[in-house]
Image (cartoon, rainbow, N blue to C red):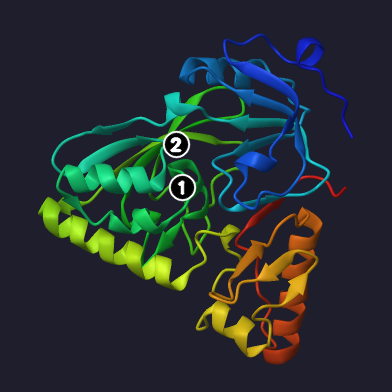
Amino acid sequence: MMALTAQDTLPPTRGAYAEHAPLKDVLWFRAGGAADILFRPADLDDLKSFMASRPKDVPLTVLGVGSNILVRDGGIEGITIRLPSAFGQIESLGPTRLRAGAAALDSAVARAAQMAGIGGLEFLRGIPGTIGGALKMNAGCYGREMKDILVEARAIDGNGKLVTLTAADMGFTYRHSAVPEGLIFVDAVVEGAPDDPAAIKARMEKLVAEREAAQPIRAKTGGSTFTNPPGHKAWQLIDQAGCRGLTRGEAQVSEKHCNFLINLGNASAADIEALGEDVRARVKAHSGIQLEWEIKRVGREA
């Protein structure tokens, strides 16, 4: 375990460092440990400068709004970067395109597109995260995903250089992109098609109503836990294996939607992860299919 101090180890920045920074309150699961060092860059130039001069042997983790991540109880080693609102701007680039900062909420981008009369981005309203996370995992729902709308993305590499990636460069597959681990996304250009704002709004409202009826979105959860295996739906496999409502400590498989794990109160990250492994083992024993985690698990065990 590294003993880091911002003053002795890390370069001067215009942003903010916080040592032993609690993360529990910013994670949707409301569980997990602290970050050794939490860094919030002031702006793009500050992030570029930091990446160019940071100690290269220190582990680096990027955290969005904590919607699709489980931080283990021992916390995150090294430096955790969380992009502030300066990276969340959304601007119009013409009749069919928007540029969205990596910290912009997917739902905010969907609403901006609706107001601009750009159709085809409504599915973003159903993704509980940021554009940066959506790029990293090719997020999607209701039959569309990031690969269907991305024109290009910009990122900072491990040496502080700004690079531009086309949709082809991203290597998108189901819930995955093939970009190098060291890249930090800063914004993306997305494209839809001209449409009537009222029609777009109606479709979004229908999508939101369906999501609220089917998913435990008011609970402490991390969203969809496992990816859908080819030809199968994860929730059905979990249900058929008898896991609906299964608990481990104060962690539970949602009775409303089996592919969601929820924190009933004060579940530890260890309880949540162990419950997920219980589900994987039961599904494997019942169907022979090995579920793969969609939720990103990071950090040290307690």
How far is mark 1 from mark 2, CA to CA?
9 Å
Query: Which disc, if any, is residue 102?
Result: 2
Q: Quadrant of residue 122?
A: bottom left
Looking at the picture, does residue 53 appear above or below residue 171? above
Image location of residue 14, percent across then percent down = 57, 10
The kind of secondary structure element at disc 2 is loop
The picture places residue 136, in percent across and down from the top left corner, at: 52, 48
Residue toward you, 278 or 290: 278
On the picture, is 170 further left or further right than 297? left
Which residue is tagged 1? 135
- Is disc 2 surrounded by few (<14), some (14 to 19) or many (20+) residues within 10 Å? many
Residue 181 visible somewhere in the drawing: no
Q: Which residue type carries mark 2?
A: Ala
Residue 214 falls left or right of residue 17: left
Asked where in the image residue 272 lies, by quadrant, the reply is bottom right
The image shows residue 228, relative to residue 159, as above or below, that is: below
Q: Are marks 1 and 2 in contact (CB under 8 Å)?
A: yes
Amino acid at circle 1: Leu
